[in-house]
Image: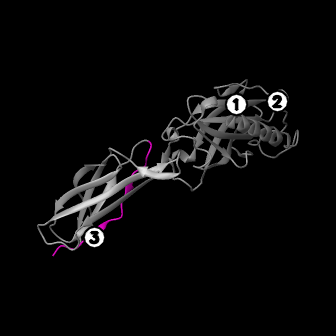
């Protein structure tokens, strides 16, 4: 139902946007198309990008960068749809969805305003951009939406008699579950040569509960930087337990900083903890 309502909103806005362009508007310069619009006889294709002479050639999401979402904060980013038609492109919009198909989506990210801003590239081509808003409490129905596999539903209106729609265009977008990482080295202070215990926790956003929970069975690097040094050295790799907790021991050698570093996965971004300074006496 969510996708059907979103499609209806997008289609309605696209039609209004196209019809709002003055018919047979005269413009200066060879690079701007004649803006004469009718969507009454629009052609439509599903899971494709062409309708007659109208072609959706490129869809870019967030400039190719990953989107990281926690449990509460909304994130805004753009979806840009590039299309061509002999009579020009004058309207366009899009939204994103994730899941096995549109009827079983586990995530839908749509714009607050479906009316895309179209920038003319040349007489036949325009890029129409919308700003979508991702709300982890509303738009992500399952943690399964994390990672890749996000698709775009995009529609463009032409300067003549057409419309083209692509319902399931693959994108490079990865929506990731935000991560947190902590480090605590004890006891402090400690005598040189004594055993230091370094604990921590790796957690990530759970979109189904709106809380952070342990990220289990993940490799996390323990790093150390001697006081006055410019870089960290990896001492060992520690695996998070069934609750995301980390624990290991090292011999205290000199004053310095300890931190945990997680490299990230396809569903969760990399994260580095705040360093904990240890006074070695």
User: In the rendering, which numbered label is found on residue 266?
Assistant: none
Question: Which quarter shows the C terminus?
Answer: bottom left
The crowd level at tag 2 (other Cα within 10 Å; few <14, some 14-19, many 20+) is some
Instruction: Tell me the element at label 1.
Output: strand
Instruction: Tell me the element at label 3.
Output: strand
Give the number of callouts. 3
| Res 203 visible | yes
Which residues, given as a range, are shown in magenta?
267-281
For residue 273: magenta?
yes
Quarter-of-image position of residue 9: top right
Mark nearer the viewer, 2 or 3: 3
What residue did someone put label 2 on?
161
The structure residue drawn at horizontal position 30% and vertical position 61%, both measured from the top left corner, is: 259
Magenta stretch, main secondary structure class: loop
The structure residue drawn at horizontal position 85% and vertical position 39%, both measured from the top left corner, is: 19
What residue did someone put label 1 on?
165
Quarter-of-image position of residue 3: top right
Mark nearer the viewer, 3 or 1: 3
Q: Are marks 1 and 2 in contact (CB under 8 Å)?
A: no
Residue 169 spot, x, y in % from top left: 60, 32
Q: CA distance from mark 3 to mark 1?
A: 57 Å
- Decide if residue 16 is on the left or right side of residue 105: right
What residue did someone put label 3 on?
277
Residue 41 spot, x, y in % from top left: 83, 26
Quarter-of-image position of residue 107: top right
The structure residue drawn at horizontal position 24% and vertical position 50%, both measured from the top left corner, is: 237
Residue 201 against residue 103 in the figure, above or below: below
């Amino acid at each position: 139902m969510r996708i059907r309502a979103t499609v209806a909103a997008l289609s309605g806005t696209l039609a209004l946007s196209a019809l709002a362009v003055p018919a047979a508007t005269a413009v200066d310069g060879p690079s701007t198309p004649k803006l004469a619009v009718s969507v009454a006889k629009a052609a439509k294709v599903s899971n494709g990008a062409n309708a007659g002479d109208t072609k959706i050639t490129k869809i870019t999401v967030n400039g190719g960068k990953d989107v990281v979402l926690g449990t509460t904060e909304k994130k805004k980013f753009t979806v840009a749809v590039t299309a061509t038609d002999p009579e020009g492109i004058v309207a366009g919009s899009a939204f994103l969805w994730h899941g096995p198909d549109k009827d079983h989506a586990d995530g839908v990210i749509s714009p607050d305003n479906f009316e895309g801003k179209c920038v003319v590239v040349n007489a036949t081509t325009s890029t129409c951009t919308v700003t979508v808003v991702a709300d982890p409490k509303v738009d992500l129905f399952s943690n399964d939406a994390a990672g890749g596999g996000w698709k775009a539903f995009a529609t463009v209106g032409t300067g003549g008699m057409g419309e083209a729609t692509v319902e399931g265009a693959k994108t490079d977008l990865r929506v990731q579950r935000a991560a947190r990482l902590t480090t605590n080295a004890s006891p402090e202070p400690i005598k040189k040569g004594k055993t230091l215990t370094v604990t921590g926790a790796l957690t990530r956003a759970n979109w189904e509960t709106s809380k952070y929970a342990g990220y289990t069975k993940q490799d996390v690097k323990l790093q150390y930087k001697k006081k006055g040094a410019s870089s960290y050295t990896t001492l060992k790799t520690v695996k998070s337990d069934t609750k995301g907790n980390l624990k290991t021991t090292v011999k205290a050698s000199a004053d310095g900083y300890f931190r945990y570093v997680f490299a990230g996965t396809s569903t969760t971004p990399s994260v580095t903890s705040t360093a904990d300074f240890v006074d070695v006496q």
